[in-house]
Amino acid sequence: MQVIVDRIEKEKIVVEIAEGQIAYIDQKLLPDVQEGDVIDLTINKEATKKRKNKIDKLVDELFQ
């Protein structure tokens, strides 16, 4: 998914998503962003699975 930076207000990035809807992103996440930039948002399924497996292993060890 791509979003477009509409403007920056205080410490919030205002992005335009589908059909004129807007959302806010904390500027600490993207400190170098500028108005008009296009941001790609993706979900990293492989990294999510690895993280979940690591957490599951830690929980299993904790309760053994």
Image: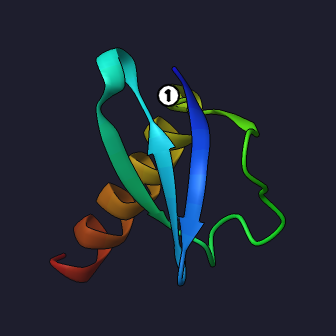
Relative image position of residue 36 (x, y in whole percent)? 73, 39
The residue that appears at 62% across and 44% down in the rendered structure is 5
Is 39 drawn above or below residue 35 in the view shown?
above
Quadrant location of the C terminus?
A: bottom left
Q: Which residue does the image show at 46% across and 57% down from the upper left?
A: 54
In this figure, which colouring scheme has been used for the structure?
Answer: rainbow
The foreground one among 26 and 46 is 26
Q: Residue at x 60, y 73 (%)?
A: 27
Q: Left or right of 29: which side holds 15?
A: left
Give the total of numbered labels: 1
Q: Is residue 57 left or right of residue 12?
A: left
Q: Is residue 54 above or below residue 21?
A: below
Could you classify mark 1 by the number of other residues whose Cα lies within 10 Å: few (under 14), some (14-19), or many (20 or more)? few
Q: Secondary structure at mark 1?
A: helix
In the rendered view, does 6 fall on the left or right side of 32?
A: left
Amino acid type at image mark 1: Lys
Does residue 8 appear to the left or right of 43 in the view shown?
right
Q: What is the quadrant of residue 17 in the picture?
A: top left
Q: Position of residue 37 (x, y in %)?
A: 76, 40
The residue at which mark 1 appears reads as 45
| Residue furthest out toward the left | 63
Q: Position of residue 43 (x, y in %)?
A: 50, 31
Residue shown at 54% from the left, 82% from the top: 11
Q: Furthest-right residue in view?
A: 32
